[in-house]
């Protein structure tokens, strides 16, 4: 049994995490939120109180924190008495926060792979470059660390595990498909920090096929999918965190990630990239000013958190898993549908942030009650998915299954 | 009779002007070139000598000059003994250079309208905002000033005058069409300074129709033209300097300017404009750096002067002029075809710079021999076009005519 949560970060996903933690503070205990910009933390706490989200009277405090400073994070854990840390700060702080958890014994949860701000799209094995190097240290200290515990990575890893366990003897392929069929009404916007968003697409696309890493270019391989609720949607093979951990846990299967993009998004992205405006390398203007083009592009694009009030439509994120059962070929699509407007009504965020922010709170609740408090480092596919699905059915992200037998909730025959 | 030329500016058009002046230094006398960056002037003079362009042994010297400083320009005119100034510097320096000519008695030639760097796309009357306010001062001082003496404005004004004088009793419309059917082989580039180029298209499009200024948006009105040599080409109604002076001299006619754009150019332009990346207003990045987006875009685009070696294909710029002759409707297309590769071979520049840079040298030669040395300020349609056409037939930009009677040189029946 662990209690008291420290949320690190104050962006769009942190907003969702804060609301969901508040809605479940009977289980989670005291709540704390810390970031470099305390005012952002205060705004989140204010929105929690505005919605009356606290399930019961309790602590929710804001703090200043430089999460790149491991000792400062450890001190914050000590000061707040947090036994669970939900890290939804920038992907640059994973290793310092994890280190603080190892030192203090607090459980660690994150939603994205560690990145070095000086590198773009590193080569696989991504987790192997950073997090997994601390696997032994977590085990030695008995520290629970759940890596990549958002939606993708996160829920989609659990979807894969569930499909393989329940529906097949052998798995041959896992295709993760992420479709945002929503409309934000702007000319162009990314759904989260443009700097992070574009970094996903400017390098080589890695997939795991035929037992080896395959390399492609972004937007080189596209495919139309016909999915529940959102219908026919074009998606492109992309690199993504979970391809790595799933490839390590299911090396016999082909593992691919597909991100949905409209023609308009691709056009804008292609123009910006071809002109060199997505570069992280500074250029010098005629006036002698050094500018990183990507940082200017970020400055002119809408703030993703400003999109929520106008966002309509739904997301569909799921895994098409293929394999054999009793010698027959089988396939199943395990998925969730989320609605942008419902998310905004409930927690003041758009659907992309909602799908990313709710699962780590479910993880925290399952650590709090002991179910997932395993005292070691895991990726989500290494956990029994059923307690997670049961909890998420209740707190906002229900899991469904579609196969030859039809479309139904995951726990219906 | 006037002699000795001071060229102001050291960009792509200045390069052409320098070569053409050198090729005709028997008429023009001593040559001088001055800009803020003397090294650029020296590079131009070096290329002149490399091509052996000087017709006879003579002076060609470089100078440092801040052309925004009228007194410095006047001193330079005095020091060099220049009686003719060809201003092909930035459009921001017109008024200071003109003032220096009025003070010293030197003849003044420019190729583009004056602009205030703090304003974008001012409203008509453009010449009336600046240059024409000094018309009386020129006349009083007996100073010859030929405004807008490049190709467009410039030659197209002479085309209009010629068409009206030779082929009709009354003119009803003048449509100027500028098609660059060349290929520079890059993903995207402007053909001259992106800052100036984009400024032409980011504001309201003004045309003169039915005796009044009409306002449209850029790319709102497009039309396919079928032209000599370059064939079918799409062009869009745009604002341009010569619409104003022609509207003042032919108020009874509709005056429109059409600029050719490929779909790819329009797409890139539209993306950049919609994202706010063509703005002259500074934005602040997350790191607190103030950046003018347009200046960054300029920094990432190819330097237009770097395009010349690979540029192939032709330009077609002309005037479709309609009117009546003896009560019958008539129309005539007066035009020039230029070739990018030929221009590069001759003067080391691409065709766009070539068409802009050769006419002001012809003007200088016609001032030198007295033909155009009228001792007052004029736009090109106020000059007899025939001496200009005759000279340009010989020095590189022949004029042709196409009408019901066929396609022929301007001076053939």
Image: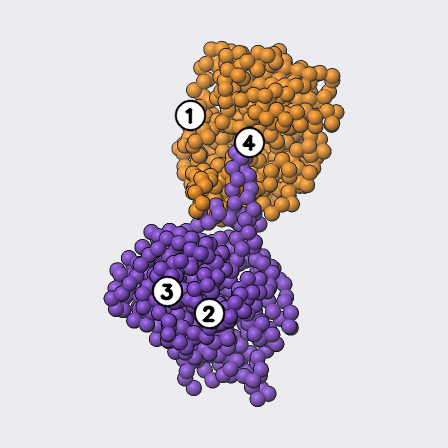
Chain colours: A orange, B purple
Crowding around mark 4 (Cα neighbors within 10 Å: few <14, some 14 to 19, many 20+) is many
Using the image, tell me which numbered label, if any, was put on residue A129: 1
In front: label 1 or label 3: 3
Label 2 marks a residue whose chain is B
Contact check, label 3 and label 4, Cβ < 8 Å: no
CA neighbours of label 3 inside 10 A, class few (<14), some (14 to 19), many (20+): many
Q: Residue B210 versus residue A106: which sits nearer the camera? A: B210
> Separation of disc 1 and disc 3 at Cα?
69 Å
Q: Residue at x 42, y 59 (%)?
A: B74
The residues tagged by marks 2 and 1 sit, at their Cα atoms, a distance apart of 74 Å
Where does residue B225 sit, x and y in percent of width and height?
A: 51, 70
For marks 3 and 4, give the one nearer the viewer.
Answer: 3
Tag 2 residue: B143
Q: Can you say whether A345 is above or below B215 in the image?
A: above
Q: Quadrant of residue B9?
A: bottom left
Output the chain of dot 3. B
* Front tag of 4 and 1: 1
Q: Is residue B123 above or below residue B392?
A: above
Helix, strand, or loop for circle 2? loop
How far apart are labels 3 and 2 at the CA level? 14 Å
Comes first in the chain, label 4 or label 1? 1
Residue at 55% in and 44% down: B282
Q: Secondary structure at mark 4?
A: loop
Q: Which mark is residue B289?
A: none
- Counting other residues with Cα less than 10 Å from the Cα at mark 2, is it few (<14), some (14-19), or many (20 or more)? many
Badge 1, how many Cα within 10 Å: few under 14, some, many 20+? some
- Name the residue carrying label 4: A152
Which residue was labeled with disc 3?
Answer: B82
| Mark 3 and mark 4: Cα distance apart in space | 72 Å
Pointer 4 with pointer 1, Cβ within 8 A: no
């Amino acid at each position: 049994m662990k209690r008291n949560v420290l949320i690190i970060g104050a962006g769009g996903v942190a907003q969702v995490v804060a609301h969901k933690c508040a809605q479940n503070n009977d289980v989670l205990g005291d709540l704390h939120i810390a970031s470099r910009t305390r005012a952002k933390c205060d705004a989140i706490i204010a929105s929690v109180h505005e919605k009356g989200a606290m399930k019961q009277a309790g602590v929710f405090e804001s703090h200043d924190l430089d999460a790149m400073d491991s000792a400062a994070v450890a001190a914050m854990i000590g000061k707040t008495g947090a036994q669970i840390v939900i890290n939804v700060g920038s992907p640059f702080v994973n290793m310092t926060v994890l280190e603080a958890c190892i030192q203090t014994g607090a459980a660690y949860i994150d939603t994205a792979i560690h990145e070095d701000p000086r590198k773009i799209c590193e080569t696989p094995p991504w987790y192997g470059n950073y997090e997994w190097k601390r696997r032994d240290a977590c085990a030695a200290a008995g520290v629970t660390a759940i890596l990549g515990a958002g939606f993708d990575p996160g829920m989609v890893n659990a979807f894969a595990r569930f499909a393989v366990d329940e529906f097949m003897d052998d798995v041959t392929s896992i295709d993760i498909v992420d479709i945002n069929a929503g409309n934000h009404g702007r000319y162009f916007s990314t759904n989260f920090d443009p700097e992070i968003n574009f970094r996903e697409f400017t390098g080589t696309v890695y997939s795991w096929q035929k037992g080896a890493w395959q390399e492609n270019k972004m937007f080189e391989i596209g495919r139309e999918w016909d999915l529940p609720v959102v219908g026919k949607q074009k998606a492109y093979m992309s690199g993504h965190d979970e391809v790595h951990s799933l490839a390590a846990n299911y090396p016999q299967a082909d593992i691919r990630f597909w991100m949905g993009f409209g023609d308009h998004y691709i056009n804008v992205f292609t123009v910006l990239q071809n002109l060199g405006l997505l570069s992280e390398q500074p250029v010098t203007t005629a006036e002698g000013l050094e500018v990183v083009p990507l940082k200017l592009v970020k400055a002119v694009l809408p703030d993703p958190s400003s999109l929520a009030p106008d966002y309509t439509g739904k997301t569909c994120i799921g895994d098409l898993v293929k394999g054999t059962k009793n010698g027959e070929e089988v396939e199943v699509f395990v998925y969730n549908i989320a609605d942008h407007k419902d998310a905004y009504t409930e927690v003041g965020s758009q659907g992309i942030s909602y799908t990313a922010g709710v699962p780590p709170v479910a993880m925290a609740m399952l650590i709090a009650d002991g179910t997932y408090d395993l005292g070691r480092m895991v990726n989500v596919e290494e956990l029994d998915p059923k307690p997670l699905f049961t909890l998420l059915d209740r707190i906002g992200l229900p899991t469904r299954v579609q196969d030859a037998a039809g479309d139904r909730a995951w726990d219906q025959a």
